[in-house]
Image (tube, rainbow, N blue to C red):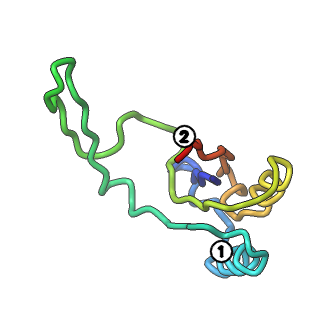
């Protein structure tokens, strides 16, 4: 999974990735036949965080993210590639890895059938 983190708010204005950059990347991932799933997330201001206390009851529900962060998870791609090196190559090509953003590469856990 490629987790796309956008730059901090004060760096976001410097972002030079265009909508066309994302279209080109989307097309490349699809044409390579490795796309399993991909989505952009709604603006961070739409998030709600839930915490559960030790008794199992919902303890706190707050609007917004669970913590102050310098980067914001903006979306993801699930790709099916043979190894980490190939996943890292695709992550490096992602527009989200530019201009202060980053792409975190993580395998999806397989708990068996």
Comes first in the chain, label 2 or label 1: 1
Q: Which of 79 and 10 is in front in this view?
A: 79
Q: Where is residue 51 in the image (x, y as percent from the top left)?
A: 25, 31
Q: Which residue is drawn at 35% across and 42% down?
A: 65
Q: Residue 22, labelled with which disc? A: 1
**Residue at the outermost top position:** 54
Q: Which residue is drawn at 39% across and 63% down?
A: 42
Q: Name the residue under label 2.
A: 111
Q: Position of residue 15 (x, y in %)?
A: 64, 62
Q: Which of 58 and 61 is in front in this view?
A: 58
Q: Left or right? Give the position of 57 relative to 33.
A: left
Q: Which residue is drawn at 68% across and 46% down?
A: 105
Q: How many numbered discs sit on the rendered protein? A: 2
Callout 1 environment at 10 Å: few (<14), some (14 to 19), or many (20+)?
A: some
- In the picture shown, does residue 34 fall above or below 46? below
Q: Position of residue 9 (x, y in %)?
A: 50, 50
Q: Residue 68's image quarter? A: top left
In front: label 2 or label 1 = 2
Badge 2 element: loop
Q: Residue 61's image quarter? A: top left
**Residue at the outermost front position:** 113
- In the picture shown, does residue 112 fall above or below 3? above
Callout 2 environment at 10 Å: few (<14), some (14 to 19), or many (20+)?
A: few
In space, the residues marked 2 and 1 are separated at their CA atoms by 32 Å
């Amino acid at each position: 999974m490629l987790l796309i983190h956008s730059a901090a708010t004060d760096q976001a204005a410097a972002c030079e990735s265009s909508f066309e950059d994302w279209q080109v990347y989307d097309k490349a991932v699809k044409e390579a036949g490795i796309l399993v799933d991909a989505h952009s997330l709604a603006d961070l201001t739409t998030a709600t965080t839930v915490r559960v206390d030790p008794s199992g009851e919902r303890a706190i529900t707050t609007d917004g993210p669970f913590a102050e962060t310098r980067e914001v998870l903006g979306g993801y791609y699930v790709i099916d590639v043979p190894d980490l090196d190939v996943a890292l190559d695709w992550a490096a090509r992602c527009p989200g890895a530019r201009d202060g953003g980053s792409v975190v590469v993580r395998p999806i856990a397989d708990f068996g059938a």
